Image (cartoon, rainbow, N blue to C red):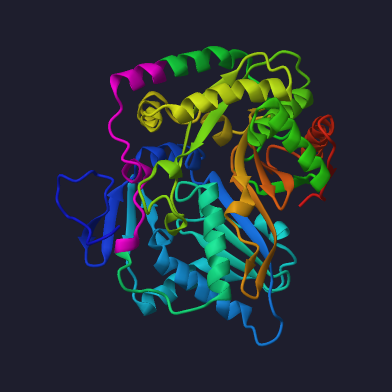
Amino acid sequence: MGGSIPTAEDLHPCEWRSASLNHYVREQDTREKLVMRQVKSVPGHINYYLIFSVKLHHPSSGFDPETRIRQAWAMLRCAQPSVGVVTAGTKVHFTAVDRDELGVWIADTFFIHPSAESAASLSATIKPNRAMQLHYLPRSKEIILCSSHERVDGLGMIMLLDKICHYFAFPSAPRLAGQADRLSPPLDIAADVGTASPRVWDKARTMLQAWQVNAARSLHIIADRPGPASSTVDTVRLELSTLESASLVSLSKASKVSVNDLMNGLVVMAAKEYAGVKECNWLGGVISNARKLCKHPYNTAEHACNVCFAAIPAYVEHVGSALDFARRIKLQRVAFQKDPEALQLLQPMLAMTGDPTDKVQQSQPQANSRCQVEYSGLGNVDELLRHTHGEVQVEDFWLTVGHCGSSIGVYGYFYRKRLNFTLSYNNGFHSRERMSRLLDTLKNVVKDCGGCRVLALL
C-alpha cells in the first residue's frame, strides 16, 4: 500500500485501515459485492470458486519438493498478503502474522495428497472455505490453487501460480516485516473509479431494460437431473491441435474479430445446436480486464490477488453463426472498454439488480431446470505463466470452475500455441453423458472452422 495504513474516519470505506494490533479491515467494493452475489447464491455453500493447476518437472535428486512448495506458499502469503484475507459479511479482514502464526496458517491452508493420481480427479473433491488453499500431489507433481471467486479473478490465479512456481524454484525466507504495506486495494480504489454520474445511471437503466426484453427468448439448455445443488463438480476439456488453433487464429484475424470473441461464438452456437432451437437471443455479458486501468503498482503481478475485471450485461438477438456473434459482441465489448466511465457502470448494476434469478431454482431443485452456458475468456496464458523457473519447468496448465448451481461454465484460453476449452458443471444437475454430448457438439462446431481433437474426460 506504500506507507502506514491511515485510520482517519473520512477515508473511503474500501481503504484498508487498522482495527487493532496487526489486524486490518475494509468494506467490500462494488465489484466484490457483485461477485459475492454469485458466490453466495446457494445458501450454505460457496457457489463460485476457481481451481487452477500446473504440472511441474523438477530434478529428482537433491530436491525436496514438499518442503519447497510449503516454503513457496509461506513466501507468497507474505509477499502478497491479500492471499490471507477473509470475508465476513461485507467486511474484508486481514491479520499480519509472525513466524509461528504463519505456520498455523500454512497448516490450515496447505495440503499434501500422497496417494492422489492426478489433480483432475482430485479437483472434484476439493471444497473451498473462507481461506485460499494450496494442494500438492507428489505422485503427479501437480499443484492446485483453490479460491472463492470474490477474492481473486482468473488472471490473478494464473499470476499467483507463476509466483508459486518461481518461489518453488528459488526459495528464501518469507518477508514477515511490512505485510500490511503490501495489501492490495480493491478495484474501486486501485482504479480510482469515483462516483457514477447521472449519465452512467441512465445508461445502466437503458441497458438493463433492453436485456430484460430479450430475456423472454434467451438461449438455455435443460438439465437432465433435479439436483441437489450441493453435488460435486465435474470437468471436461477440449484442446485443439496446433494446426487447428492456428486456423482459428487466422480466421479471427481475417474476420477482424478477437480470438476470444470467436471462441465465445463457438460456445454459443454449440449451446444453440445442443438445445435444438432455431431462433433465440443470447444473454450474457461483456468483460473488461481493468488491471490496465489501475494505478501503479496495483496493475502488476505483485498485486495479483484481486478482482480486477469488470462485466456488464450484453445480448445478441437472433444468433446466426459464430462469426456473426463474434462481430456483434465485439461492438458491445469495444464500446464498454472505451467508455471512460465504464467502471462506474458497476455501481448502478449493483443497485438495480438483486440476487441471481435462479436462486430459488438452485435451492429447491427440480427436474428440467433451464440452465445457462456461461463463457469466460482468459486470453494467452503464456503471457502470465512462464514455462521455466530455473531448474523447474511447467509442463501443463488447466483449470475448472466450481458451481453449486445449475449453470455450466466454459473457460477459453490460449496455451502453448493451442486453444483450449474447459467445461465445468454440477453433476447434480447434469449427467456426464449429456455433458459429453454438449462437448461433442462443440467439437463439431469447431470442426467447421478447422477441426479439433478432444482430451479424455477429466
Placement of 325 over or under 63, stated as above or below = above
Q: Residue at x 27, y 53 (%)?
A: 16
Q: Is residue 189 magenta?
A: yes
Q: Is residue 373 left or right of residue 79?
A: right
**At which x and y percent is residue 316?**
61, 18
Task: Please say if 293 is above or below 221.
Answer: below
Whether residue 223 appears in magenta in the rendering, the answer is: no
Q: Is residue 362 visible?
A: yes
Q: Is residue 383 above or below residue 285?
A: below
Magenta range is 181-205
Q: Is residue 133 left or right of residue 239?
A: left
Residue shown at 28%/46% (left/top)?
Answer: 14
In this orientation, does residue 241 appear?
Answer: no
Front residue of 36 and 63: 63
Residue under the point 35% across and 74% down: 176
| Residue 145 place in picture, x, y as percent | 57, 59
* Side of 66 where 82 appears, left or right: left
Residue 267 appears at what percent x and percent y? 71, 31
